[in-house]
Image (spheres, rainbow, N blue to C red):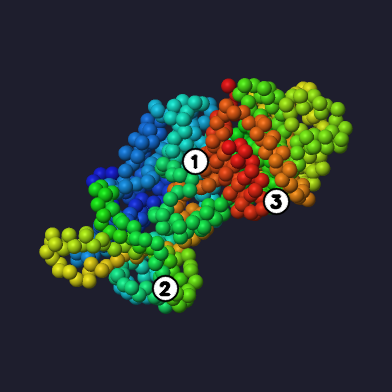
Amino acid sequence: MSISVNGQSQVPPGFRFHPTEEELLQYYLRKKVSYEKIDLDVIRDVDLNKLEPWDIQEKCKIGTTPQNDWYFFSHKDKKYPTGTRTNRATAAGFWKATGRDKVIYSNGKRIGMRKTLVFYKGRAPHGQKSDWIMHEYRLDDNNTNDTTIVSNVMGDGGQEEGWVVCRIFKKKNHLKTLDSPLASSISGEGRRSHLFDSCDEGALEQILQQMGRGGGCKEENYEANNYNFGRYASRPFDTGIINNNNGNYRDNRFMKLPSLESPKSTSMESHQNNTNDNDNNTTITNNGYHPIIPIDMVTENEGSFTNNMVHHHHHHHNPMEASSSSSSMMVGSGGLTNWAALDRLVASQLNGPSMGFCTSDHDLQFPTLRSSSSSASTHTRAAASASVAAFISPNQDYTSEIDLWNFARSTSSLLSSSSSEPLCHVSNTSA
Amino acid sequence: MGDNNVNLPPGFRFYPTDEELVVHFLHRKAALLPCHPDVIPDLDLYPYDPWELDGKALGEGNQWYYYSRRTQNRATGNGYWHPIGMEEPVVTSSSNKRVGMKKFYVFHVGEAPGGSKTNWIMQEYRLSDSASSSRSSRRKAPPKTDHSKWVICRVYENDDNDDDGNGGIELSCLDEVFLSLDDLDEISLPN
């Protein structure tokens, strides 16, 4: 049975174009870039700058059957002759990359990468996020070294021009409904655990990495009384920065990261004060800086950082000293640069050990996990959530954040039911 | 998929909608019309265990399709299909007209009623009574035979770990988190 697509299309009933990622890359995109003839004109060329997602939907129909996703080739051009960024703006909006590129494997061999983008209506930076998602697949031929991946974490850098194959679809709700309510009642448990199974350790690290990149929104003493979860959360789970748009704290953006098990910020301050014999403590507190880096860092997972951290902890307790030392972590907008450094570091951890970061980024401070897990009492939890409430600016929209906390809660409840309670508590407070 | 007699380029797969299963495959089968493509095999009432379907039924991804008949006895070699829940109507997308019914079963290993539940699910599609009767009355032929008792079974194992079973077509939970984090990005930009 032969079909013709995009002409008088006749796809046999019941059949859909549902290529695997491997098929997209190995068959379609590989033929495209090598100018080989593709049997059927299933995937069309689209100028991403000229078509809105809803137009693509029309242009890339295959047959007459209903579709949930649409495929096309796109030729990536540089935004500026000298730069590496890709221009993905349309008349009505723009595509913005999100998350971290995913490596696509075929038979255990790396063949390409997938970038996820979201369509925003309007103009950056005031675009309005839509439900349109794009997966952009590129072949791996040119960039196979790990440094490229690290740079990709930072944005669009490091990618070549050329053909990519894309799929767009409209995002469904987080917990999508199955074919039927009956089916979901059957498989509810399975779906749920499946959902969070895929969030393995690496995934969580990515989340944490991303959170670092996101800049801060609130101060929070986040605790994990469960070792399993704490292990994952030993990266900065919250940036610990107060980003009050009214400006009280923004100019004092100390890039301090929250300790996981700081029983209570006040007690931790005094603890530090005693241990460090730090006479800057008063100054720092007045600046709105919440010193929450534990000194007695006993860590199993990040032992390699411990020495640096203890060492530089003293170093940076003095704001004057820090700002004069050209470290970008301290003040105002410079803080973002520092998060970029943190990004790189975490990325390097994800992509294999690269010890260079540990020594060069001396201004980074990491929260660590004390493996001797202190039993978080109700008292502690109350204190932590109170501090959350105290630092939330009522003018800000925390909807997405609440989603995140719900996610974190669910994740932690998967990892261990015992850790869900404090998280739940925190998220309720912030809601 | 090698048993398809359909020559399609890579990436085309049998992912029928409920409506297609009923309107195209079941109706035509019941009306003794040729099915093009004739991809769904007729396994009659043979009591295969669900894990035996591979190679016999039409397999696509982790789903298997085959024709069977309406029956009360859904015992197999090593277990039985136990009905769950109520039936669901299958309606046409264009006119919202009911054309069939869809019923759910879960496979139990062992003797009814004491078997133990498995992850295997079956959706059984049948023509709704009104649809088949109106068709036969309109067309006069064929007369009521047991062809109206055809069903299509879709069997799949509810796999907890089919991470990319959808080919990445939906967002993973991780992607969702990234998405919501993008909002934080916007918030935290100093103006």
Which mark is drawn over residue B80?
2
Quadrant housing the C terminus of chain A: top right
**Three-letter residue code for mark 1:** Thr
Kind of residue at badge 3: Asn
Q: Which mark is residue A226?
A: 3
Q: Is residue A398 above or below residue B159?
A: above
**Image-based side of A108 in relation to A123, left or right:** right
On-image quarter of the N terminus of chain A: bottom left
N-terminal-most mark, 1 or 3? 1
The reply to whether label 1 and label 3 mark residues of one chain is: yes
Residue located 40% across and 62% down the image: B85
Q: Residues within 10 Å of mark 3 (few under 14, many from 20)?
A: many
Identity of the amino acid at label 2? Tyr
For disc 1, the neighbor class at 10 Å (few under 14, some 14 to 19, many from 20) is many
Disc 1: which residue:
A116
Q: Position of residue A127 (x, y in %)?
A: 47, 28
> Label 2 is found on which chain of the structure?
B
The label nearer to you, 1 versus 3, is: 3
Of helix, strand and loop, which one carries label 3?
A: loop
| Marks 2 and 3 belong to one chain | no
Q: How many marks?
A: 3
Q: Quadrant of residue A342?
A: top right
User: What whole-number distance in Å separates the C-alpha atoms at marks 2 and 3?
Assistant: 43 Å
Q: Dividing the picture into quarters, in which one does residue A312 lie?
A: top right
Identify the element where label 1 is drawn.
Answer: strand
What is the C-alpha distance between the residues marked 1 and 3?
33 Å
